[in-house]
Structure formats: structure tokens, C-alpha cells
Amino acid sequence: MTEPAVGLIANPAAGKDIRRLVAPASTFDNSEKVRIVRRILAGLAAMNIPSVAYLPDAYGIVERALAGMEGLPLSCQPLPVPLQHTAEDTLAATQLLVAAGVRCIVTLGGDGTNRIVAKMCGSVPVVAVATGTNNVFPTMVDGTLAGIAAGLVARGLASPVCIVPTPRLDVLVDGKLAEIALVDVAISAHSFLGARAVWEPELLRELIVAQAAPGVIGLASIGAHLAPGATERGRGLHIVLGPGGLRVQAILAPGLVRPVSVRHWQQLEPGDVVEITELPCTVAVDGERELRVAAGQRLSVQLTMDGPRRVDIRSTLVDAAARGLLRVMP
């Protein structure tokens, strides 16, 4: 793979979960993702990026994007991933991209897609383009701008301050890492995983939040309404739900707002551990149920600063413009 190279992971399943049945959330169909990828590739080409490695998928998002872009001065090669059409494809693709030495990974997806990438991306910066449901971690941005920002990062032209460290929540079962979350971990009284997506606050017991800036959508919005700005200062939140305390409006999904009762909450510092004592339970990470924990097991959640290095797209473009990088490329 010729350097500097960029990796591209477009999730065809992002933005299509069951929350479309219980809330009037928008749908990012795969045709729109094709158009977004075209714009990303145009931005990368404008930054003189010579090669892109991408995760193929059953719909052929990148291949369809390339159709009609003949003459693009950009080599695009599919990764040799034996497709299972599950999250394992994203995991394997990220691992291959890191091993190949890419300098930036562009993702099209929601919080769940980026959570999978975060498991394997290490120190490789991520340009996260929102095509999911709640989109707390990724950014709603035109693909052209995302491509230009990724190109600047891949060429080593982005200022270090534009690549931001992010928090992570480690879910530990019997002392071993079982899952991670980039936004929130929800503890539910459910005894089954079911449709996976979480939207019923009355079934939740506890919530641990890593990112909760005002304006976010999803369970993290509960934290944003309790302690606005706390997570922007590097702190997390532990929230115990139930009657007897405050009531806040939770924006659970686009167009779905419900009052939620909060019995107790406190801020967390990086390194703090929350012990979950009411077992059995199910654990949802970034809005999706992933784990069942049985009675007799030990469950805890730790806030760390081990999340992926996220590219602040706007800051990258502002910085590049101020330094004249977008007038004449060196």
C-alpha cells in the first residue's frame, strides 16, 4: 500500500435499526452513503492522497461510488476480509488497516460502528462521518470536508490540537474486559438481548456516561441535562434511575422525548470504577444490548481516556485555512 494511505469503512447497516419503528428517525439508505463516499474520495484526491484501502460490503458502497469517477487520481483497493456481514467485518478491516500503516481511518456509521473501530484502531486517528441513529461520537458533515480533513491528517499537515483524545468506558465482567463503549453503558432489568437497541428508559437501572454534551441524542442526553459540560471537561457521570429524585427530559432517539426519573447521580473522574451490584442484568453499550451478566458474576464499568483519537473536522479545516494550506498545497 503506497503511503500516505487512508482507510475507509462504510457500514451498510448503520442508521437502520429498530428505532426507526419507535421514533421518526431519518434513514441513511445505502444510495446516500454512496454519494457521501464519492464526496469523501473527491476530498482525498484534492489533498493528493494516492491510495485508499476500504472494507467491501454486500451492497458495494465504495464500488458504486467509484463508478463514474474514472480518472480519479486515487488508487482504491478492497481489503481481503472474508465477509460475514456482521460487526466482525469492521473489526477485521480495522485490524488490517492498522497493520498496513494507514495514517487515518474514515468511518461512515453511528456510535456502534465507531465503537467497533475503536477496539482495534489504536493510535490511528479517526474521521467519523455520521450515518447512524443518535450520532454522539461521529460528526454530521459533508463528505467533501471529511475527505479534505482526512487528507490533511494523512499527509501530516494537521495540527496535533485538531486530533482529540476521547474517553472510553470499559465493561469488566469478573475482572476481565468484556466490552467497551464510547458514549454510554446502560444497565437494564431485561433478561434478554432482544432487538438490541435500547429506547425504554423504564427498564433501565443505571447509566454510566462518557460523552454528554448538551444537544446529544440518546441515553447520554440524560447526563447532558443533569450536568451540562461535565463530560467536555473530561469527567463522566454515573446515574441511578428511579423515583424519588429529579425528572429530566430524555431525548432517546430523533423525535422521541420522554421524562425520566433520576434517583441519584455523581460525576466520575478518569480511572473511577462503578460497581454494578444488582444482578442478573443486561448491558447495553452505546445504545445496543451486547451482554448478559448472571447472578454470581462481578460487573463493573471504568471510565478511561483510552478512546480513539478523533479528528475535529472543523478545527482541522480552520487551522489549515489559517496556515494557507488550502490555497496552494506544498
Image (cartoon, rainbow, N blue to C red):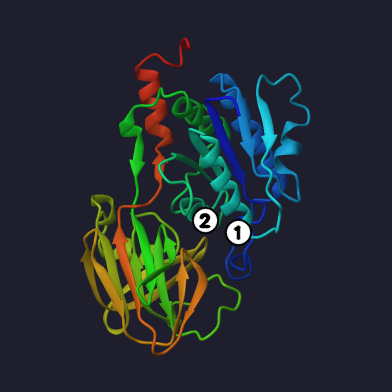
Q: Where, quadrant-wise, is the N terminus in this rendering? A: top right
Tally of marks: 2
Task: Name the image quarter holding residue 71.
Answer: top right
Q: Position of residue 166 (x, y in %)?
A: 35, 49
SS label for mark 2: helix
**Label 1 residue SS:** helix
Q: Name the residue under label 1.
A: 87
- Percent position of residue 237, x then y: 28, 65
Residue 26 picture quarter: bottom right
Using residue 222 as the reference point, say whether residue 8 is left or right of it. Answer: right
Mark sitting on residue 55: none
The residue type indicated by label 1 comes to Ala
Look at 26% across and 54% down and name the residue there.
229
Quadrant of residue 16 within the rendered picture: bottom right
Q: Nearer the viewer, residue 149 or 224?
A: 149
Does residue 193 lie above or below 30 as drawn?
A: below
**Residue name at image x 56 percent, y 18 percent:** 48
Image x and y of residue 326, in percent: 46, 16
What amino acid type should be assigned to the residue bearing mark 2? Ile
Residue 199 at least partly seen: no
Residues under labels 1 and 2: Cα distance?
7 Å
> What is the crowding at mark 2: few (fewer than 14 residues within 10 Å), some, or many (at least 20)?
many
Indicate which disc, 1 or 2, sits on the residue closer to the N terminus: 1
- Residue 278 located left or right of residue 15: left
- Which residue is disc 2 drawn over? 116
Q: Is residue 326 visible?
A: yes
Residue at the (47%, 9%) spot, across then down: 328
Do the numbered discs 1 and 2 sit on residues whose CB atoms are within 8 Å? yes
Q: Is residue 59 above or below residue 301?
A: above
Q: Is 276 drawn above or below residue 59 in the view shown?
A: below
